[in-house]
Image: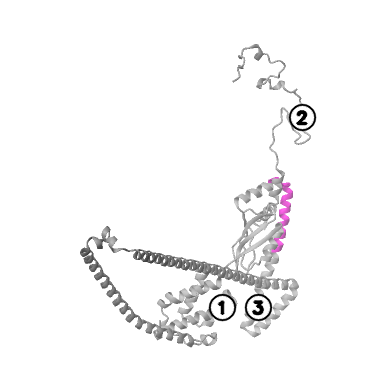
Amino acid sequence: MSSYEPPPLDSPSVQNTGNRRPRGPKYADRGMPHHGAPLLNPFGSPMLSGPDSKEQPPVNFNAKRQSENRPIVAFISGIAEGVSDIWVEKLLKTCGDINSWRRVCSADGNPQGFGFCEFKSPNDAASAIRVLSSTDGRKEGGWSLPSIKPTQQKLMIQVDFSVKELIDECQEMTNPAASAKCATDDELVQSVEGIIRELEAAVIETSQTDETKDEGGAKNDDGADNTNEHAAVNAESGDDDGEKVVSLELEEEWEKERARSKRHKRYIAAAEEREQQTIAKQNERGDRIKWNAMRDLDEAEEKQHQRDDMSVMLSKWDDVQQAQMGEHSYYRDRQRWWRHRKAERAREMELDDADRRQQEREACASEKPASATTERRDLIEALIKEIPSDPKALFEWPVKWEQVNDALIKSKIEPAVRKRLAEYLGGEGDDSSVSELSDYVVTHIREHKPPQELIDELEMVLVEEAPTFVARIWRFVVYESEAHARNVT
């Protein structure tokens, strides 16, 4: 260890600081010469230091640029019935650039009055909110889109609270003059008013077309006059209105095709899920069979080892030696061993007799059910062959409705209907659409209505699969009614 010790604080060597600069708050002004003007920094902010300068936080230009270019998803509601996606996109694109517009559809493919729009930037979303929304918009009272049916719905554009803060922040960073902003919004409001006038004209044209068709189907003479007047109106309105009607028809066809595609995808997904479940069950069953086989093999091997050990022991058994050792109860007290052995043998004989009598009773009892089961199976197979598979002949079959009671419907028909609908629609058993359609089909059967009416109603949902579905359900109803009538259930 070193023998060096520091000098005391009051020693001259410690007090003599030489030419070193003193430190501390009271010597801070002596470190640099004071100037009236601040120093300039050529590599950053012009204000480096000075008596009146304040430290400013750095500006993150990359974050600002990313926020300005970030897409914004907004919830659009208040869309009147009958307004197609073409008109909605036209209104949204008038206020700013959008990436996509997705209309929400019901289970049967009908478009709903709301959807989601992805704007290209927060500025585009803010412009749409200011111009179109009924709460924060510049239009007093909001916008009501024209429709065939009167409605009080107002167009609404809503975003999440955090997204709203981001939009406000971007507006503050890139906010132009107030007068220029108001002028731009006024121009957009005028453009929206022009689009709504065009939409109103298209709605009026569509309603006139529908009224003309209805009146023409009621009366031929009046229908001819209305057709001539409608043709005159079309001639005056020009080719634009005809294009609007065609576009509406194409839009309806596109919606039906999209609903059919979604239903097919759900059906494929459900089929794949059922296939995976079936494969999992088969694998589990195979593993269980392998485990049982291994257990039986182990038991057989254990019994074989016991037999081998017994054979070895008996081959080496020496009565004289065992009698001299006296370890076994047979050699210690032979009379006592024999009494116990006779009692055990009597119990074994009783158990064997009981097992033999039980086997005889089971054999006698199984002969009668076996013959009855065979006879019932033959009757069921004959009934199945008797029921036609052709839909036309099947629908003409006289159903014994007196056998189709509420108990039969709840226990067998309704579960079968729900299972078939789940297969066709690709949904689960507790799905709302499956439950609604199942209730409708069961009500149709309970009211003893013809199958063709059921096909006509289900074609809107199942499309080309409706006849096949109704034929399968109707064949099941016919079979259950005949089976109960013939007492083969």
Query: How many C-alpha atoms fall within 10 Å of the one at disc 1: few (<14), some, or many (≥20)?
Result: some
> In which image quadrant can residue 327 be found?
bottom left
Above or below 393: residue 417:
above
Q: Where does the image place residue 326, in percent across and percent down from the top left?
A: 26, 59
**Residue that extends furthest to the top in the rendered view of this protein:** 12
Decide: is 323 above or below 275: above
| Measured Cα–Cα span from mark 1 to mark 3 | 32 Å
Q: What is the C-alpha distance between the residues marked 2 and 3?
A: 84 Å
Residue 252 seen in this snapshot: yes
Secondary structure under badge 2? loop
Q: Based on the displayed image, in which of its 4 quarters is residue 199 positioned?
A: bottom right
Q: Which residue is mark 3?
A: 212
Sequence-earlier tag: 1 or 2: 2
Question: Which amino acid, by three-letter code, is at mark 1?
Answer: Ala
Circle nearer the N terminus (1, 3): 3
In the rendered structure, which segment of residues is drawn in magenta?
172-195
Sequence-first disc among 2 and 3: 2
Can residue 181 be found in the magenta stretch?
yes
Q: As shown in the figure, which amino acid type bears the numbered disc 3?
A: Thr
Q: Is residue 431 visible?
A: no
In the picture, the quarter occupied by the N terminus is top right
Mark 3: secondary structure: helix
Q: Which residue bears the numbered disc 1?
A: 466
* Residue 97, x across and y down, in percent: 71, 57
> Is residue 250 part of the magenta span, yes or no?
no
Which amino acid does the dot numbered 2 rest on?
Leu
Q: Main secondary structure of the magenta part?
A: helix
Q: What's the residue at 20%, 65% (across, down)?
A: 335
Q: Closest to the observer: 233 or 401?
A: 401
State the residue position of label 2: 39
